[in-house]
Each structure stands twice: as structure tokens, then as C-alpha cells.
């Protein structure tokens, strides 16, 4: 296994562990709620972390099988993982503050930049790995 693949798998494990801890927070919020539901962003943080953990595991496969140099593969994966972590942290922030149940309602002007960064970083990063996979494996 390549070093960059091992790092990506390690981050997948860390994100999965984070998701499990967030599941405890969600469970506690549900048991303390009169309607049995956690705040929407507590729920979203938990689900997003679970999904991003498995997405990161999938990214590791593409890192391992890509034909690009290690630095290119790691940079593409790192960009996506960083954005996953920032997104989860933002959901946690929204869940802790309990100020909104929809961050897209009355978003700050900076939200356009954040969304553009997510689009470019996640789609661009994965496109790099997918093309590297295709050139090496097909």
C-alpha cells in the first residue's frame, strides 16, 4: 500500500470515529428532547460524518490505483478531506448554536465563496483521481 493511501485510510478512520462520537451526541439530544428528535444540524453532522468517512475510504481506492505521482494524488485527496472536515465542523457549530434549521435561509454573502470552494475542491479533487485511475487502469 502506498503511503498516501495509508494516510487517506487513516483519515477515513478518524472521520468514522468522529461520526460515532457524533452519534452519541445525537442519541443524547434525542433522549433529552420532548419530541424525541435531535436538532436538525446535530442529525446532519452525524449523517454527514458517516457518509464522508465512507467517501474517504472510496477516495483511498482511487488514490491507490491512480497513475498520477504521489504528490498529485495526495493533494487531490487532501483537498477533499479538508473540505469534508470543515463541512462537518460547520454542521457541529450550527447544532451547538441551535440558531437555524436551514443554513441556506438568509445566508451570509461569504456563502457563495464557500459553496464555490466546495464545488471546485470536491469535484475537482475527485476528477483528478478519476482521470488518474482511468489513465492507469483502463
Image (cartoon, rainbow, N blue to C red):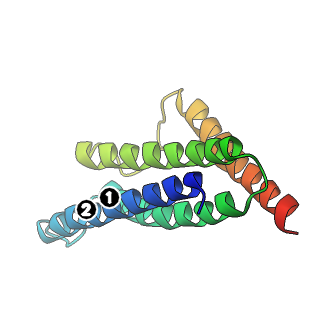
- SS label for mark 1: helix
Badge 2: residue crowd in 10 Å (few <14, some 14–19, many ≥20): some
Label disc, if present, on residue 21 of the rendered structure: 2
Q: Residue at x 32, y 58 (%)?
A: 18
Asked whether residue 103 appears in the rendered view, the answer is no
Q: Residue at 56%, 44% (x, y): give it.
A: 78
The image shows residue 63 at horizontal and vertical percentages of 66, 57
Q: Quadrant of residue 132?
A: bottom right
Q: Position of residue 62 (x, y in %)?
A: 68, 62
Q: Quadrant of the C terminus?
A: bottom right
Q: Residue at x 29, y 66 (%)?
A: 20
Q: Is residue 138 above or below residue 5?
A: below
Tag 1 residue: 18
In the image, residue 1 lies at what x, y percent?
59, 63
Q: Can see residue 69? A: yes
Is mark 2 in CB contact (under 8 Å) with mark 1?
Answer: yes
Amino acid at each position: 500500500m502506498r503511503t498516501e493511501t495509508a494516510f487517506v485510510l487513516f483519515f477515513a478512520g478518524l472521520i468514522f470515529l468522529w461520526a460515532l462520537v457524533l452519534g452519541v451526541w445525537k442519541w443524547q439530544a434525542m433522549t433529552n428532547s420532548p419530541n424525541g428528535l435531535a436538532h436538525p444540524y446535530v442529525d446532519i453532522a452525524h449523517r454527514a460524518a458517516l457518509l464522508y468517512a465512507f467517501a474517504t475510504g472510496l477516495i483511498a481506492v482511487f488514490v491507490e490505483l491512480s497513475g498520477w505521482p504521489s504528490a498529485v494524488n495526495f493533494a487531490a485527496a487532501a483537498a477533499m478531506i479538508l473540505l469534508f472536515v470543515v463541512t462537518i465542523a460547520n454542521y457541529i457549530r450550527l447544532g451547538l448554536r441551535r440558531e437555524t434549521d436551514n443554513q441556506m435561509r438568509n445566508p451570509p454573502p461569504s456563502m457563495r465563496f464557500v459553496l464555490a470552494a466546495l464545488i471546485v475542491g470536491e469535484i475537482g479533487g475527485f476528477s483528478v483521481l478519476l482521470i488518474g485511475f482511468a489513465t492507469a487502469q483502463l
